[in-house]
Image (spheres, rainbow, N blue to C red):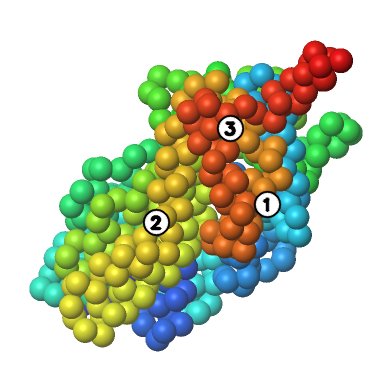
């Protein structure tokens, strides 16, 4: 298309990608009175366990009908097949179907005033102080390219962000896990299946550097795994896990994609483009949690763009990463250390699962997950866990199980 042949549609902001980050950013900006254009590629469903914390449900006003299941416990499975149950005190893990959840977020943005386009992003082209956004409409003729004009762009187009590759220096520094899951119909007459529990497997044969999962989604469940190790067959792993657990119901769909596990060093191009969500790398290490952080990242990107539009100062876009890392960087750092140490050998995985049996670990883990804050109310528990963790880390402490096993022997030896 010859862009000079007609006057282009003018927007304040173009949002590329309609997942949780992009849809949230579009909603925030339209509510603030800006004219927003939202581009999404139809038909794609993000491979995801679908877990969301209560704080997300509260902060982003998620309606009840989108929560397809509430998990009130997790079962952690060690390489030895030892199991640790972690009940959630006074809370739950919400489960959503990404196909329905993401579409609802996009439609909310449209109801707030965003203009939505279904199509594939092609490229950005600078035009004075504005950006020309070229895309291929979903319903257009093959090879047809359309174009709109925007004052600013938010790239929320996923882990392999084309926006990032075109405009943001350092976007090739991303660290990724290849994730794959199968959506399977849940068993109806199997007493061993608990639709209110998430099962997490820490086994080197199922993932050499991450974990595998079984998450309930109401009438279906997600069975998946992830790894950064090239050549490791994640499809075979899911087949093996299904055979191991007997979850051989009808497969509804299969999905796979890279998941970033480290925030990129830079999220803006120094001019008028900023990244959000997977495009910026905001999926938590160790846990792989991404929906909450994507939506918060979308908020921060929207706030930074508002400041940029008000001041015309490109430095305002840096606030997106700065503010996100100020609020969540410490958690990402801790989780990164956890993954790099505990997920490397089955011996360490076994110790890690043993730690999960500690009531203080369980309480602090769930409180931090549900509220997205490091718990400060129980300082003695933090100290206790810190020293116990050091013992496991360096192999200088005995596990509770070992102490329990040795206690009867000691009593026998002393008469």
Q: Where is mark 3, residue-wise?
A: 352
**Nearest to N terminus: mark 2 or mark 3:** 2
Location of the C terminus by quadrant is top right
Given residues 317 and 412, the one toward you in this image is: 412
Question: Residue beneath label 2, please?
Answer: 329
Q: Is residue 145 left or right of residue 372?
A: left
Q: Residue at x 40, y 77 (%)?
A: 29
Cβ atoms under marks 2 and 3 closer than 8 Å: no
Residue 219 image offset from top left, x and y in percent: 77, 45
> Is residue 137 shown to the viewer in this render?
no
Label 3 element class: helix
Q: CA distance from mark 2 to mark 1?
A: 22 Å
Alpha carbons under labels 1 and 3: distance apart? 16 Å
List x then y, in percent, for residue 325. Answer: 36, 60
User: Does residue 183 lie above or below 378 as drawn?
Assistant: above
Q: Position of residue 331 (x, y in %)?
A: 46, 53
Disc sitting over residue 363 in the figure = 1
């Amino acid at each position: 298309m010859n862009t000079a042949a007609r006057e282009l549609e003018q927007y304040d902001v173009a949002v590329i990608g309609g997942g949780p980050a992009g849809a949230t950013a579009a909603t925030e900006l339209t509510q603030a009175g800006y004219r927003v254009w939202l581009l999404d590629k139809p038909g794609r469903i993000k491979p995801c366990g679908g877990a969301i914390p209560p704080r997300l449900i509260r902060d982003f006003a998620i309606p009840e009908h989108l929560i397809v299941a509430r998990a009130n416990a997790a079962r952690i499975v060690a390489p030895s097949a030892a199991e640790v149950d972690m009940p959630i005190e006074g809370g739950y893990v919400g489960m959503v179907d990404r196909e329905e959840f993401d579409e609802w977020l996009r439609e909310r943005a449209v109801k707030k005033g965003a203009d939505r386009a279904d199509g594939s992003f092609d490229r950005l082209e600078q035009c004075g102080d504005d950006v020309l956004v070229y895309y291929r409409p979903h319903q257009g003729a093959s090879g047809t390219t359309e174009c709109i004009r925007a004052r600013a762009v938010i790239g929320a187009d996923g882990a392999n962000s084309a926006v990032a590759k075109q405009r943001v220096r350092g976007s090739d520094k991303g660290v990724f896990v290849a994730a794959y899951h199968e959506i399977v119909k849940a068993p109806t007459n199997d007493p061993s299946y608990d639709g209110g529990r998430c099962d997490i497997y820490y086994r080197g044969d199922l993932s050499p550097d991450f974990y595998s999962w079984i998450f309930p989604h109401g009438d279906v469940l997600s069975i998946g795994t992830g790894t950064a190790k090239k050549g490791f067959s994640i499809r075979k792993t899911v087949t093996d896990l299904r055979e191991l657990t007997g979850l051989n119901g009808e497969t509804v769909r299969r999905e796979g994609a890279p998941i970033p596990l480290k925030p990129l060093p830079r999220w803006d191009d120094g001019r008028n483009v900023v990244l959000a969500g997977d495009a910026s790398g905001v999926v938590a290490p160790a846990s792989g949690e991404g929906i909450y952080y994507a939506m918060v990242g979308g908020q921060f990107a929207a706030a930074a763009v508002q400041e940029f539009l008000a001041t015309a100062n490109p430095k305002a876009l840096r606030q997106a990463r700065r503010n996100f890392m100020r609020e969540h960087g410490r958690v990402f750092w801790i989780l990164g250390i956890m993954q790099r140490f505990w997920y490397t050998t089955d011996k360490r995985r076994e110790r890690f699962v043993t730690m999960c049996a500690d009531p203080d670990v369980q309480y602090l883990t769930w409180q931090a997950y549900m509220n997205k804050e490091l718990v400060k109310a129980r300082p003695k528990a933090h100290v206790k866990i810190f020293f116990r963790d050091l013992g496991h880390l360096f192999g200088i402490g005995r596990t509770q199980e070992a102490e329990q096993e040795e206690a009867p022997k000691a009593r026998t030896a002393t008469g």
